[in-house]
Each structure stands twice: as structure tokens, then as C-alpha cells.
Image (cartoon, grey):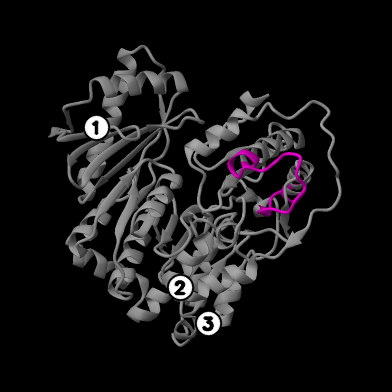
Amino acid sequence: MSDKIKFGTDGWRAIIAEQFTFENVERVAYAVGLYIKKEYDLDEKSKALHKPVLIGYDTRFLADKFAERAGQILISMGLSVRLVDRDVPTPCIAYAAQNEPTAGAIQFTASHNPPEYCGIKYIPHYGGPATNDITNKITEHLDALPKDYLFDKGKVARFDPMPVYLDAIRKFVDLEKLGASKIKVGYDALFSTSRGYLDKLIIEAGLPLHVLHDHRDPLFGGGMPEPKAEFLTELSQLIKREKLDVGIATDGDADRFGVIDETGTFLSANQLLCLLTRHLVKNHGMSGAIVRNVGTTHLLDRQAKLYGLELIETPVGFKWIGEVMRQKDVLIGGEESGGVSVKGHIPEKDGILANLLVLEMMEYEKKPLSQIWKMVVDEVGSDFYARRGDLHIPQSAQKALMERLKASPPVSIAGEKVVKVGRSDGLKLYLDDFTWILIRPSGTEPLMRLSYESSDETRVKTIMTEFEKYARSVLLELNQPEPAVAAGSHSSF
């Protein structure tokens, strides 16, 4: 049975009623329980009180029931359990896990995945993603649940993690100062767990607020709980119609964020990372390393040089960023997919805090977002242009292509010399310090993910076209199927 359950960069996700069943939830919960009992040296026969395991869930279908079942399994193992009293943002349950002595937390969420998915992730006591070492140990126990295991299906003790988490956010963001700005805000909750959290703080600050989709809907209104441009058209229209200053949103479990400026234009996560980095340095006088993954903009590298800060690159997956944040003095850690955390907070993505920091930045600068972005570009002396152009090929072809590229990477692309090759995650081809191509196999989908960046828009388009031709020629040479190309998503700023 364990072959059905694969822990990825952020836990295990699967389709409800296919792989994500109560039976498999029981298996995972039991495996987590065994890990906790060993990690925290708990006697299996002891019923004494000890550090509790916290359990949370998002707004998805049956997520609350899955969470309760996991709690019942853990209680049957002699563990102390506390279950949230309503759906909860992942950063909130992560904060609760590290704010007091706990044995960590289990969160039921599929984050920004389609509504038919659910997921489960274990958050250790430090309040960030579980490392590979931890998830590997949990995986070892996935077949350990005894057949016909008996457990009490009684009620699980409840708790409310909201007050303590909101107090922590208030320490980061001066709501009184923010309220003086009277920034007009549009907020699309996307039917997520951030409703009742993010809007509560904005209302507390006294800002004019227009809200969309602020109720629980396991089907997410027929859309996707992902704060990308294509899913925030209503918010963009609201901004323009009501003449608002900014639009903000979170994904399903509120660990990622999205922002739209006063013109109705979506700002990429790459832009927002640069904006927040500048805000923390310029307006808060903070310092520390900047941590990004291999697919995130190198404009952050320019900022690091400008501000005299260390730049650290990690593989894809926030667990790598979180691990660096726990070990070093880090100012900000983020990824191009919309996850960010900052110094002094949990080593986990937090879309609620990130959105509030954007509002705070606008109050400090007293300028619209589009103008603040121009200030960033002027300061570093360059813009950036990013593109995606995934190849739809089976995993066997992905493997063959990656083996060939790693063994014999191209010496030039579009007539430009490849000056450096990175192999920390996939293959990264550098044409200069700020022009690169990242090739990564999906691992879970029939996709080869191709990312491109340059400081010149025409150049990045040419490089994208020529590299796709090159990849196709290699696949043909290897007798692999002809790939289809997904439409490249253009982030031009």
C-alpha cells in the first residue's frame, strides 16, 4: 500500500476517494505517530501527558473529517492531540507548532491544487516544512498500521490557534501606522483559509476594504485556489471599477500570495520578492542573507550586491529555504511560485504576512505599486524578463533528455556561449550572470519544466525559441516522442 503514498516537497497529495482515502489517512497518521514516539522518546504504554500533536485542515471536501480521523489514530497510540476548531491557514498552524512545546503539527491541505485533491503534511516543532530526513523516516512506517487496527472514534480536543498567530503578525506590521494611509484594498479570499484572518487585520487597521469570495466552498467556485493572474481577473476588474489602490489574494491554505497593482496589473512573485527585500532593507533597516531557489529571479542577486548582503541559492521546494532560515541569519527567503518568509518569523511560507507587508510598504513609500516597482528597477539598474515553456513528454523521455543534457550540455544557445552549468536541481545553463535556462523534470507530471530569464526581452524570447528547438532535436536523436509545448507564461517587468 505504501507505494501509493509519495511524500513530495510539501507532503503527500492525491485525489479524494481515489488514493486519498480514510484508510490511507490512517496509515499516514500511524506512521507520523510512530515517528513522533521515536523522535520524542515516548513510551508506547505510557498514558502520561506530553507534548501535544496539533492537527489542522483547510477548506477542502472532507478535510475536517480526515483531520479528526488522524487525531483519533494518534490518541489511540497514546499521544496527546489538539484539533483546530475551524479551517486554518498553514502558516497559523505552523506558528502554533513552534510557539509552545509541541511534537509538531499535521496539516490537511492540498494548497493551490484543484478541488478534487487533498493532502497531508507534517510540520515539525520548529514550524517549517519537514526535511527529507524526516519524511523518509515517516515513509519507512507507512505499512506499519496493524490490520483491523482498533481505535476510539470519539471526539478530539479542540483549540483555536488564531489569537496567538494574529498577535505575532501585529508585531511585524504596525496596523495603526498602516491605517493612517487609508489605502483602498481589494481582497480576494479565493474561498481560502485566509478569510477571517487577513481581512480581520485589514479591518482592524481601518483600511477601506472590498472583499471577494470570502466564504467556504470546497469547489473553490469552480476555479483554482491559486493567486495567479488567470484566477484573479475578478479582482483586477474590481480594482479598476472601484479605483482601488491594490488587490491582494492568497492560495487555498494561505501560504502563498498574489498582488495586483492600481492599474489592475498582476505582479509576479519574482517582483514581489524584490519589492519586499527593498522594503525590509530601506524602510526597516534590516539585514541578513537573501535566499532564493534555482528558478527564482536573479534580480535578487543584484539587490544582494547593492545592499551588501549574501545571496544563497537552494533547490526547488520551500523546505530547503526553511532549512537555511533555521541555520543562518536570513533576511528573506522566497520562491517564484509565491512563497515567502522573513527574518524573525517561522521558516515557512506565509501569504498573510506577505500581503500585509506589501500594504505596509505602500504606506512607507506613499506611492502606488507601479511606481515603487520602477524605483526597484532604477536602483538595480536593470529590469528582468522571465518566461516558461514546458515540454509535454512522458517521464521516460524526461529521464533520457536529462541524462543526455547532464552528460553533454550544449556549449552554446542561440549563438551565445554557455559560460556555466549548474546541477544542484535539474540543469541550469548560464549565458551570463543574469541570463539563464533552467531545465527540471516534473517528477509527478508528463512535463519537462523550462524556465528562462534575461535582462533583455528580445533576448529571452530568442533563447526560449532556440533552446526548445535544441531540446526537440535531442529527443529526436534519442528516438523519444515529439513533445507538445505548453504556452509560455510571460512575466515581463
Q: Residue at x 23, y 25 (%)?
A: 409
Label 2 belongs to which residue? 172
The percent coordinates of residue 315 (x first, y second) are 37, 40
Q: SS at mark 1?
A: helix
The quarter of the picture where the N terminus appears is top right
Label 1 belongs to which residue? 466
Q: Nearer the viewer, residue 104 or 430?
A: 104
Q: At label 3, which amino acid type do we have?
A: Leu
Label 3 belongs to which residue? 207
448 lies left or right of 42? left
In the image, the segment drawn in magenta is 36-65
Q: At label 2, which amino acid type do we have?
A: Phe
| Residue 97 location, quadrant | bottom right
Residue 202 seen in this snapshot: yes
Q: Main secondary structure of the magenta part?
A: loop
Callout count: 3
Q: Judge the density around disc 2: few (<14), some (14-19), many (≥20) Cα neighbours within 10 Å.
A: some
